[in-house]
Amino acid sequence: MASMMQPQIILLKEGTDTSQGKAQLLSNINAVTAVGDVVRTTLGPRGMDKLIHDDKGSVTISNDGATIMKLLDIVHPAAKILVDIAKSQDSEVGDGTTTVVLLAAEFLKEAKPFVEDGVHSQNLIRSYRTASALAIEKVKELAVSIEGKSVEEKKGLLAKCAATTLSSKLIGGEKEFFATMVVDAVMAIGDDDRLNLIGIKKVPGGNMRDSFLVDGVAFKKTFSYAGFEQQPKKFDNPKILLLNIELELKSEKENAEIRLSDPSQYQSIVDAEWNIIYDKLDKCVESGAKVVLSRLAIGDLATQYFADRDIFCAGRVAEEDLNRVAAAAGGTIQTSVLGTCEIFEEKQVGGERFNIFSGCPSGRTATIVLRGGADQFIEEAERSLHDAIMIVRRAVKNSTVVPGGGAIDMEISKYLRQHSRTIAGKSQLFINSYAKALEVIPRQLCDNAGFDATDVLNKLRQKHAMQSGEGASYGVDINTGGIADSFANFVWEPAVVKINAINAATEAACLILSVDETVKNPKSESAQGDAAAGAMGRGRGGGRGRGMRRR
């Protein structure tokens, strides 16, 4: 009786939405699985593309996991975690973004029956973390180093890694052509980590094979004044002057006031303005520079002045391009230090004209000029090349590779299944479910290519179960629908991609499993309704009483 008389304790504001317990956890798992299903079909060389049309009317066609996750605009709080891990995988290693989302969703899918049966999520988390550590150890053990090879051999091996990445992209048909280009670009920047030293310029028109690599810097012709056409368009071994100043007549700043007592003094002020600009131009010519680039405008006077003296100039050059010229030509912006290059020329590429600096002494920069039909196609090609560049950079830094095509996933899965049998207790079941989840990669590769996944997986299990260990590098053969030695077929990926993917996917799964309650603050929802009601000027006095009803 006493307990019935106790007053109700109101802890949270009225209208606060709270959901907790098993139902909440299952709801989160379902949301994550739904997101995994969206990107599932984009995995692998036969993966489909997604066409995403946003409210602004722009259309993106992509099969890059991170791009799709960013554009989906997911609102479910638990599912947003998958967006974050896809972004982190993209910025960390560049490829494997679909893999990481798929693994996280599959780990949770395998955990769902245990949660429904009343297993405490902390037990699952503990086992998943153990399994993750064992899996990463196994990847490191199976990885093969490509260190200690000659430069040519290493280039060939890196091209294989780039080709594996590109095979699942829209430009997969020309993967060998682009893989060589990407490796040359990464080798050009050497040990420098800055990705912006590799420029990618897009020119619509032509076909993919018309794309080319400039061993130096290339950028579109900037806005130019009369006199520009009289300037020479090609130089051998020119000196390059990089400026950060305007080379045009400048009006006085606002509110400047000059009082004259004699009209003749006015002419001296005008002359002074002209003398200032001529002084700048004379200094540019005296420096011996044959190519003058400036971040700010180069006016019509300066353009004609340089044309008369056989000097090429370009104003309003993008800062990024100017910095790359500085890095390549060995100059510094707005100083007396001049850069140089072997050949400078202005060339027609499709409908655009490009200024190309090649044979730069400092090297350390490269530009890929991409050609193709539709704009969406070129943009997807750029995203694909970005992934390939990241992969090659990672392979250069961490020179170990593992077989792709689902081979490494099957091998880890087999290893974890065997290990789970040595464990007594429930943990055996959880590690076994983790091992099963890893098989999602080869299974999805088969599904996306239209093969019988069950048949192929059975063949793979049989190969990987061989005691001799010779089947360890067998994966799905996309071309025949059977299985093949991924290592012998040069389907390679850097070990760091797999390690990062397993790590991130496990962390995300454990994070979602550890959430048992969601509290939704009502204030943020009602704020918009109140604002709309206030704007209509009705308040509580007229109209519909208490503002606009939320639908």
Image: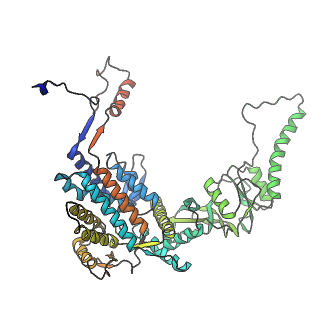
- Residue in the foreground of this view, choosing between 304 and 318: 318
- Residue beneath the point at 55% across and 68% down: 186
- Which quarter of the image is occupied by the N terminus? top left
- The residue at the far left in this view is 1
Visual colour scheme: rainbow
- Residue 513 sits above or below residue 40 on the image: above
Q: Which quarter of the figure is the C terminus placed in?
A: top left
Residue 422: x %, y % from top left = 23, 69
| In the depicted structure, whether residue 156 falls above or below residue 208 | below
Residue 20 drawn at (x, y percent): 23, 42
Q: How many marks?
A: 0
Residue 16 placement (x, y as % from top left): 28, 33
Q: Quadrant of residue 411?
A: bottom left
Q: Please state if 304 lies on the left or on the right of 260 as rendered.
A: left
Measured as percent of width and height from the top left, residue 29 is found at 26, 52
Towards the viewer: 298 or 496 = 496
Residue at left 38%, top 74%? Answer: 142
Query: Which residue is rendered at x = 44% and y = 58% of the image?
Result: 90
Q: Examine the rendering and report whether any part of residue 296 can be seen.
A: yes
